[in-house]
Image (spheres, rainbow, N blue to C red):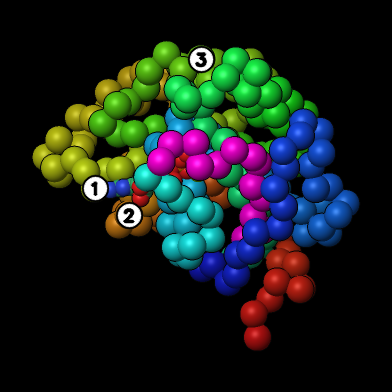
Amino acid sequence: MIRVLGARFVDAVHEAGCYPDGIHPAIGRAQEIAFAGRSNVGKSSLINALVGRRGLARTSKVPGRTRQLNFYVVETLRGTVVFVDLPGYGYARVSRNEHAGWRLLVESYLEERPTLSGIVLVVDLRRGIESEERELLCYLRLHGRPAVVAATKIDKLPRGTRRGALQAIADAAGGVEVVGVSGETREGREELWRRLTLPPIACLAKRPAAHMRTP
Ligand code: GTP
Ligand code: MG
């Protein structure tokens, strides 16, 4: 079981290439996991569920809440990891310019970030994998980025229908592992953590940063 000792927001990045390397020593060393997915799907809620802190990443009923890359340092008993909350795609109320800006920001991060060890593609269990998700998985494969699919909002589906919905996502994910989760009830939290700490994602640095240790 993963025990989270502390988690904190360290930086927000609005511009491609301006990542917090070297500014925050903990980020310089630690491996990162980025959370990608459709706007309003539950990326920020899932980060909160994984670290066990409701208000760490800001969530909203209104799509498009997260407009920048938010970096969080998470210290666990087994080491330190950085979670990066990416702005969501598929948000209709954005101009062409804003969309181009989003693409540049997210793609340059996904392609160039040396400390990125893997991506959690968050999908709504009820919607499954649609063309955007298929494209993103293809893109990640092309760039050699390991991924896992987190099928979230599992609490919104009756228990009897969950297995079928997860299988449909697994069938469409082309070999990428799928974990059912809920940002609301925290179901699947341990399984997702387990997946993130195994190769090919294996995101924990060996030693926790001293300044993050709780007394
Ligand atoms: P953007 O930042 O806009 O891209 O959205 P996001 O993907 O970060 O979604 P966010 O976590 O803000 O959640 C969107 C809405 O869905 C909020 O009202 C959450 O409370 C709700 N929500 C997220 N995850 C779950 C879940 O697992 N179950 C339920 N029932 N609601 C959820
Ligand atoms: Mg968000």
Q: Which mark is residue 16?
A: none
Q: What's the CA distance linking mark 1 and mark 2?
A: 7 Å
Q: Nearer the viewer, residue 167 or 11?
A: 11
**Residue 136 located left or right of residue 12:** left
Q: Secondary structure at mark 3?
A: helix
Dividing the picture into quadrants, the one containing residue 68 is top right
Magenta includes 64?
Answer: yes
Three-letter amino acid code at the position of disc 1: Asp
Q: Nearer the viewer, residue 108 or 173?
A: 108
Q: Residues within 10 Å of mark 1 (few under 14, many from 20)?
A: some
Q: Secondary structure at mark 1?
A: helix
Q: Name the residue beneath numbered marker 2.
A: 184
Read off the magenta span.
62-74
Q: Name the residue beneath numbered marker 1.
A: 155
Residue contact between numbered discs 1 and 2, judged by CB atoms under 8 Å:
yes
Three-letter amino acid code at the position of disc 3: Glu
Residue at the image point whose x is 32% and y is 54% from the top: 184
Q: What's the CA distance linking mark 3 and mark 1?
A: 27 Å
Please provide percent x and percent y for residue 17: 81, 33
Q: Nearer the viewer, residue 151 or 203?
A: 151
Please provide percent x and percent y for residue 188: 35, 50
- Label 2 CB-ligand 1 distance < 8 A: yes
Q: Residues within 10 Å of mark 3 (few under 14, many from 20)?
A: few
Query: Mark 2 or mark 3, which is nearer the start of the sequence?
Result: 3
